Amino acid sequence: MGKFERKFGRYAIKNLSMILIICYAIGYLIYLIYPEFLNNLTLNPYLIVHGQVWRIISWILVPPTLSFDFFTLIMLFFYFSIGRTLERTWGDYLFNVYVLSGILFTIVASFGVYIFTVLVPPVSNEYYMLGGMNLFMQYVSLMYSTYYINMSIFLAFALTFPDSMVLLMFIFPVKMKWLGYIDGAYMIYLFIVSNVYTKVAIAAALLNFIIFFAITRRRRFGSPRQRMQRAARSREFRNTVRRETPQKGVSKHKCAICGRTEITNPELQFRFCSKCNGNYEYCNEHLFNHKHVE
């Protein structure tokens, strides 16, 4: 447990995945009763700085997709199940950090787009031409939802449980790592074909996964220096085993320093040292850096 977790772990939100699903349920209910009201909940930095501060939080209520049918229920249940699994595996604190960092990065990115738009107005954009900054930012705010954050949760689950099986279309068993590859490829495709504002939304929502992947890879494989040290220890172990294992036949060459022969290490070359007093033979690794025998 890290120092941050010891200090802030007690503030972690319990059952965060369930809370997200409840937020979506409220959003769908609003959409079914009064669809236009969702425009009052989107992440719009222009209106936030003009007093509508609730939008910093209320945009989480906006459902990841506005189509509501049986497949939407299946999707919500699926995201809830993988979220609960990650909560149990990582713990409430780490799952909170992952999800909330994705939300925070998205908020920061939206304000970054707003500041850039103020400095460099998109005068050629039709929304800006029709309604100025207000209408333009209302258009851009539609790009920011938890849709991409949910996809990053899916990628994290695929990375954590790559060999777990799911039933695709309730029929075909598929490993999570293959679905993760498909999900990642789809995200890359969306990033390529979308406009610049959607690119920012995708990048912000996936930044938490990139950080998580880097940390996970470092924990699993270590730093480059640690990997080199492990490789060196592995080579030394193999060489030790070769030296201690009885070999068939009689060797013609043997290093006076490490004891390796052309049988144990056929990749080595052996030479006699003309400066040593006696017939001392060395491998190419010790030929020029040994202490001469007088």
Image (cartoon, rainbow, N blue to C red):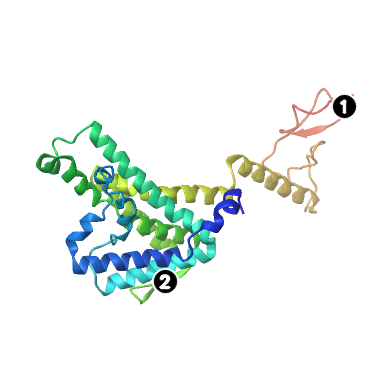
Q: Which mark is residue 166?
A: 2
Foreground mark, 1 or 2?
2
Q: Residue 232, how many percent across, how many down?
A: 67, 42
**What residue lies at 40% left-to-right and 51% top-to-bottom?**
102
**What residue lies at 18% left-to-right and 63% top-to-bottom?**
35
The residue tagged with tag 2: helix, strand or loop? strand
Q: Residue 140, how many percent across, how many down?
A: 22, 47
Quadrant in which the N terminus appears: bottom right
The residue tagged with tag 1: helix, strand or loop? loop
Q: Residue 289, how many percent across, how many down?
A: 76, 27
Q: Earlier in the sequence, mark 1 or mark 2?
A: 2
Q: Which mark is residue 293?
A: 1
Quadrant in which the C terminus appears: top right
In the image, 217 versus 244, the foreground residue is: 217
Quick check: can you spot residue 217? yes
**What residue lies at 32% left-to-right and 39% top-to-bottom?**
112
Quick check: can you spot residue 163? no
Q: Dot 2: within a 10 Å radius of its alpha carbon, few (fewer than 14), some, or many (20 or more) residues?
A: some
The amino acid marked with disc number 2 is: Val
The residue furthest bottom is 171
Q: Dot 1: within a 10 Å radius of its alpha carbon, few (fewer than 14), some, or many (20 or more) residues?
A: few
In the image, 118 versus 79, the foreground residue is: 118
The amino acid marked with disc number 1 is: Val
